[in-house]
Amino acid sequence: MAVAAPQTRHAEHEGPPVRPTGRRRWTAGGWLRVAWIVPLAFLLVPVLVLALRHWLSYPSSPFSVLNPLDDSGWNDDFWRFAKQDLQPLITTWTVVVPFAFLAGIGGFDYWAYWISGRPTRPEDHSGHGARTWRDYFRVNTDHKVIGIQYVVTTIIFFIAGGLLAMFLRAELAKPGMQIVDPQGYNGLFSVHAALMIFLFIIPAFAGLGNYVIPLMIGAPDMAFPRLNALSFWLLPIAGLMMLSSYLVGPFAAGWTNYVPLAVQQPEGNLFFQMGVQWAGASSILTALNFLVTIITMRAPGMTFWRMPLLVWANFATSTLVVIATPFIAGSQFFILFDRVLHTNFFDAGEGGYPLGYQHIFWFYSHPAVYIMMLPGFGIVSEVISVFARKPIFGYRLMALSLMAILILGFSVWAHHMFVSGMAAWLRVPMMVTTMIIAVPTGIKVFSWLATLWEGRIRFKTPMLFALGFVSMFVIGGLSGVYLGSIPIDIHTSDTYFVVAHIHYVLFGGSLFTIYAGFYYWFPKMTGRMYNEALGKLHFWLTFIGFNATFFPMHWIGVRGMPRRVADYDPQFANWNLIISIASFFLGASTLVFLYNMLVSWRSGEPAPGNPWRALTLEWQVSSPPPVFNFDEIPQVVGSPYEYGVRGARHAVLNGAPTTQGREAAPMEESVP
Amino acid sequence: MASVAHAPEHDHHGPPAANVSSRVDARLLGIYIFIASEVMLFGSFFTAFFFARIIVPNETWPPEPFELPVYLALINTIILVTSSFTMHWALQSIKRNYRAGLIAGLTLTFLLGLTFLLIQAREYTRIGFAPKDLAFGSSFFGLTGLHGMHVFVGLNLLLYALIRSIRGHFGPKAHDHLGVEIPGIYWHFVDVMWIIVYVTVYVI
Amino acid sequence: MRRRAVIQMIGIGFLAGIVTGGVAFFIPWLPDQASEEAKAIDAAYWFVVIICAVIFALVAGVSLYSCWKFRAPPDDEDDGSPIHGHTGLEIYWTAVPTILVTAMAVFSGFALAAAEDLPDKHGTIQVTAQQFAWSFTYPELDRTEGELVLELDKPMQLVLTAKDVIHSFWVPEFRMKQDAVPGVETTVPITPIKLGTYDVICTELCGLGHSVMRARARVLSAEDYAKWAAGDSGDSAETTTGEGGDTSTEGR
Ligand code: HEA
Ligand code: HEA
Ligand code: CUA
Ligand SMILES: [Cu+2]
């Protein structure tokens, strides 16, 4: 594309930002403002809702049954009604309180200036860079800070989701009910899956992308830094919302939340509906930001065909997010309306079509599985090329196959509905498209293998995870092909075979690539090296624990164990016990990872700018990179993967081509 | 913490200017992508509507005994379409540095949009069915309500642009009236969407 | 040198193949085959298994071989050979999977048709699912029971529907599964070919009692079936729904 004149920005830098003092601390954006604005919103909502309902004289309003002359009314009827009618209240809370929080923390400050017509303050970059650990708890517009905020937040939700899985496995260790009741069990796997998908895998990729994409394409930041900050702060809201469903009893209709069951569930279900909206908004805004950044902010010479594959992968993923995510928003709005406004979108008795929900849901959620995989493909491409020290094999086809998956991904949603009783004619076409997706995916797998061929492979931790990913993902992908074949799916649908598939593609696939990414960019993000021995230990424990946990699930599934059951036939008792024990082992292996990350972040060896001798741009600056990434925008002159090609360069920085990176940046403060 | 070591030592002022690698302005591209996402949101509501209408067999549409106020809605459609033209005029005015035209155009657009919304609110109260009446009622209120929400958001954006144009913040250079252009693009989108909603829900 | 590499690789691939094949064939994967439909489904199953086992062995073989053969010595700083691609290979690994995938899809299509093919002369049973119990109505007998009783070798069409939420009918030994959706009628054909008692399992999450929503399916010989039809309910009058049976929906 044409290289236009550089964009000018206001550039008055005034050193560290001046923090307000005295009374103004309570009104300036930050936690103090949150501390009063959120409780205020919290209290205001019931007043508003109840007053409004009273005014509209809703028969079910608690005030309508309140007899002012009889104080026992307060005790009985009022509370009975109030409890029955928690739904409108909860819904309003889950809409209003997050806005109050965002306003409190300062997410809207700039726009508020703009709206009110006051002159907007010139960008003083006070929101850029982190000077102390406290800056990570503020609205910060630096993509590197936001990237780290994302990564840490998502790891916390991963632990939460993983611990739920541990309870789940503890319950399943023996037939019969031991530690939770059936509704509680259903809540466990629903919240487990919702956290893992919406608050771990998807945003973890967004966080890694946030950190490295501007660096990789030679940009000083993302296109919309304030929007970027806002997207991050939506995330803890969504996560806390899903977890806080435990206050009223967790949502328990599975992460798929099929109607009519979802409509019939207790209030906890609302937390899923609204949590998905906030998480979805976050990922749409981030995706938009990625797309605009990648399209408009590439360094001179960085044509599309010179972009690292991670950038390509995020480009494809972001397109998917922007197009598909509104469908899950819609599907959850329908349930919300059905529950709160008593609409009948899918009620067969009222002229609705119950399977309509599933079509809308899967039209998002199948593409969503590629949202959870394509960025991983990108990470693995980077890692394999660097550690095999070879150009990625068939670069163009690798990029094109991403786009092919993106397009095909929209044509297969009904393979989740083969036995649902949907229109029978739709099944075979969907089976064909489902299977065809194996072809572009296969191209990627074979190209990675060919990249290893005649390489000089170094088995650093990121590489181990990348190699583990390739083999485990192939198992998961092939079990996907089983499921894609209608006759086989008729038998295996909704059994533990599907649970095995899920975890082979999501754990062995997405999570392995996320681990690879965490280890690979850890030196860049923190300026310190992680402990290699612990990293390798983590890999092997995880690899073994993972297979021991999830491989037997294929078998018990095919033999006849349905999924989502709190209790099961005693014939599966032994295998379930083995699986549970293996899963505790797997969970414990995560401790090694956490320990390694925490300790290395505090006191690891200082990392050089380019410890992996990689060619992509993020490694050509110091670790961690300067606040504005590059002193001067680099000039890109070649492909990012020219390992072994004498004299080849990817880019020229500050007049000099660098492949070895600069000096290490010692750390001065650490995060507890 | 990541950048601790570097904060004090970077002595240049602000970031290097980013390279501009596309002819489309980032903010315009942003709003177009956002609108693509919005179109899909409407898509999901249309899908629900079509399930209720086509997949479930209906003898008549709208189902007995309900009726839709087609002509009232037509008047409303005309109002909204007109507002697109006034919006266009406002943008053209600022491009020619004609501020009075900008303010007048935005004010008119805002008032027309508000009229649309009020008429729709009145239509809702008189329409003779509620969101809970059949999947028909649900998807009718779903689609028109979703659109109404968008009109509401659009009105807000117009209001902000209006405030700023009264304060004289916009100018004729392409870079200086993005604050009018972007709400305008959104407003045209809301308008086109209404035509589609009108045709599918009321007319066909 | 090259020859040796090929032999080594084939060796590793062979080993991987043996392991994969062993897992695929020597573990008793499938439950008993108790219906005509199961034959078609198992055929598709084995067809796909063979293709997938070969693919996995290939991938595992190549990656293990590469890891072993191309590992860098400890202090090595060199790069690998700068191979950027190979159009021929790329065409191969696009075309061959396409062919395999097409083969699997076509085979599955035929298997599906065979499994769902029901002779015109067949009986009908009305199946109703509700939280958390099954009931089976035999129109010819004008009877409703809590268990599914089938006659050996007699094709049956089950017509499913649900009263409250979505449930799913599954008998692993019959291999057939079908959701029961409120307001929608779905069908599933079953032709039992083996005497015995099996479990009807609900496989679609339907609430608290989902895991205990089970019923019994009995396949009787022609004589026994006639006896049962004549009113001798045998030992099977009551439903086997378990404790969740009468707990109605929670909340709301
Ligand atoms: C990261 C997430 C992810 C990914 C990448 C995939 C990838 C695939 N999935 Fe999976 N899937 C899930 C996550 C994912 N899935 C989840 C979460 C569910 C359950 C949802 C729920 O109900 O809760 C599910 C459920 C699911 C079902 C429904 C099962 C059911 O409920 O009845 C089906 C059916 O077709 C399916 C198929 C596939 C296929 C064909 C692929 C393909 O994309 C795989 C392609 C890859 C390969 C095939 C391997 C590599 C290729 C080669 C080595 C080339 C050669 C291969 C051949 C020639 C075959 N998946
Ligand atoms: C990315 C996605 C992801 C990930 C990573 C996981 C991880 C795990 N999952 Fe999950 N799972 C899903 C996505 C995921 N799952 C989905 C989508 C479903 C379908 C839900 C539905 O049906 O609606 C599902 C369902 C599901 C089921 C089926 C439930 C059912 O159908 O009844 C089971 C059962 O074993 C299970 C188990 C596990 C286990 C043991 C882990 C482990 O790998 C977790 C390991 C991690 C930790 C344990 C946390 C961190 C560790 C520590 C803090 C150390 C301390 C802990 C100990 C020492 C114990 N999962
Ligand atoms: Cu009925 Cu599960
Ligand atoms: Cu899918």
Image: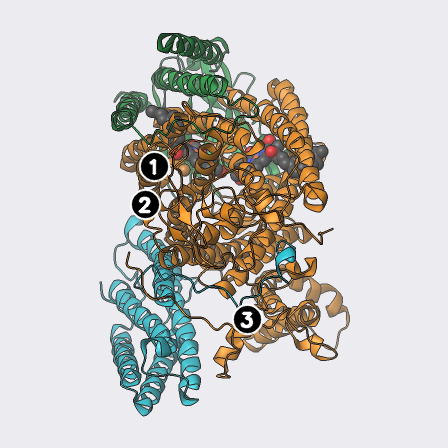
The green chain is: C
User: What residue sits right under mark 1 in the picture?
Assistant: A395
Q: Residue C182: percent from the left, percent from the top?
A: 43, 43
Reply above or below: C165 against C54: below
Quarter holding residue B94? bottom left
The mark that comes first in sequence, 2 or 1, is 2
Instruction: Give the Cα separation between the discs numbered 2 and 1.
Output: 9 Å
Q: Is residue A484 left or right of residue A559?
A: left
Amino acid carrying label 1: it is Tyr
Chain under numbered label 1: A
> Going 36% across and 15% down the picture, which residue do you hit?
C39
Q: Residue A653: percent from the left, percent from the top?
A: 45, 52
Reply above or below: B152 against A79: below
User: What residue sits right under mark 2 in the picture?
Assistant: A305
Query: For the residue with label 1, is its CB less than 8 Å from the closest atom of ligand 1?
Result: no
> Going 56% across and 64% down the picture, which residue do you hit?
A95
The orange chain is: A
Q: Nearer the viewer, residue C178 or C138?
A: C178
Amino acid carrying label 3: it is Phe
Chain B visual colour? cyan
How many neighbours does mark 1 have within 10 angstroms: few (below 14), some (14-19), or many (20 or more)? many
Chain under numbered label 3: A
Amino acid carrying label 2: it is Trp
Q: Is residue A585 left or right of residue A615?
A: right
Q: Nearer the viewer, residue B193 or B142?
A: B193
